[in-house]
Amino acid sequence: MENRNLDIIEILEKVCKERGLDFRQYKKTSLERRLQKRLHALNLKSYEDYIVRLSEDPAEYDRLIETLLINVTEFFRDRDAFDVIRNKVLPDIMGCKADARHKLKIWSAGCATGEEAYSMAILLNETLGNKSDNYEFSIYGTDIDKDSLEKAKAAAYRIETVDGKIADEILDKYFVRNGSLRVKDFVKRSCFFLFHDLVLDRPLKAMDIILCRNVAIYFERALQEKIYLDFYNALNEDGCLFLGKAETLIGPAQENFEVIDKRWNIYKSRPLGDARLRYERNLSRNDCHSHENGNPDSEYLGLDSRVRGNDRSKSRQNRNYSVSN
């Protein structure tokens, strides 16, 4: 068993070195199930054999990463939870924006193919109604799956995936039906999809709402605790965090949030009372790049197209993800 675990660690280290993705703090039971799929597909009997295959066939890294990644999403997944966002979270946050040029920023972390980000854009348009022109909102969907990000940017989905799940009036208002279901351009303009690794990269900054649903359940406890603190520091004061049904806050971050809705694991950040922590938080925000018109800067958008494999791991210490306006 010890040798088996060492082989798994070696595989994960090779993935980190060759592709710049760190799965080493993901739950081992989940990783092992997915590794077994690759062994079965290749008719290999041991992890040692698989390590040899990785060395001989670099393309296997991509097939492995695709197997390790979990992309399960849909529009308005858990509709009752989105009702809480609309009825409790958004009125509170927008009430605080009266003197802040009505800017609202949302981060969908682990966005997969983008349905959650677009759901939030639709929800905002529906909630604001005729007042939507008075608000400037940006929704940032991030993931480490480049193929999923490309699908999110394309914003075209199979019609059968929404059958009976979205009212016809919403479909007509926000989608174009033409063989597939395509998100209308006015909705797409508020959504940006970016490569970002929750394990290795610094968090985005100055967010009003963060959605990270059914992602942390695949992480070891230490990594969960680290990411929840990252989310706290990524939020504006009184910002909200929305986790998955099977997830809950653990570790030091528990003290930094209050519960808005226990059933749906929606939390509100508490103000920082410690002057030193407030200083450190503001300092990290002042380190951010500035952006015009609510768009991420070109360096941010171009990073994934420029960095590949080992080059990405060499440059990640300089990656400070900011989308401040």
Image (cartoon, rainbow, N blue to C red):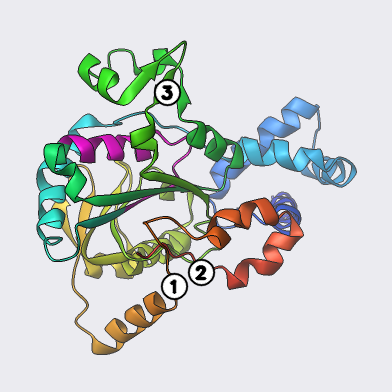
Q: Quarter-wise, where is residue 254 in the image?
A: bottom left
Looking at the rendering, the stretch of residues picked out in magenta corresponds to 106-126
Badge 3 element: strand
Q: How far apart, in angstroms, are the residues tagged by discs 1 and 3?
A: 34 Å
- Please tell me which of labels 2 and 3 falls first in the chain: 3
Q: Which residue is mark 1?
A: 288
Q: Position of residue 209 (x, y in %)?
A: 27, 54
Q: How far apart, in angstroms, are the residues tagged by discs 2 and 3?
A: 32 Å
Question: Relative to residue 81, is residue 240 depicted above or below?
Answer: below
Q: What is the number of callouts on the image?
A: 3
Give the crowd class for mark 2: few <14, some 14-19, many >=20 residues within 10 Å.
some
Q: Which residue is mark 3?
A: 182
Q: Nearer the viewer, mark 2 or mark 3?
A: 3
Badge 1 element: loop
Q: Which residue is mark 2?
A: 320
Q: Are marks 2 and 1 in contact (CB under 8 Å)?
A: yes
Give the crowd class for mark 3: few <14, some 14-19, many >=20 residues within 10 Å.
some
Quadrant for the C terminus, please. bottom left
Q: How far apart, in angstroms, are the residues tagged by discs 2 and 1?
A: 7 Å
* Residue 10 in the figure: left or right of residue 52: left
The answer to whether residue 22 shows anywhere in this view is: no
Q: Say which residue appears at 74% left-offset and 26% top-offset.
A: 41
* Residue 10 in the figure: left or right of residue 108: right
Please name whichever residue, 214 or 32, is drawn nearer the observer in this view of the structure: 214
* Residue 177 in the figure: left or right of residue 299: left
Q: Are marks 2 and 3 in contact (CB under 8 Å)?
A: no
Q: Say which residue appears at 62% left-offset and 41% top-offset.
A: 32
- Please tell me which of labels 1 and 3 falls first in the chain: 3
- Residue 113 magenta-drawn? yes
Question: Relative to residue 37, is residue 22 depicted above or below?
Answer: below
Please name whichever residue, 85 or 132, is drawn nearer the observer in this view of the structure: 132
Q: Say which residue appears at 61% left-offset and 57% top-offset.
A: 303
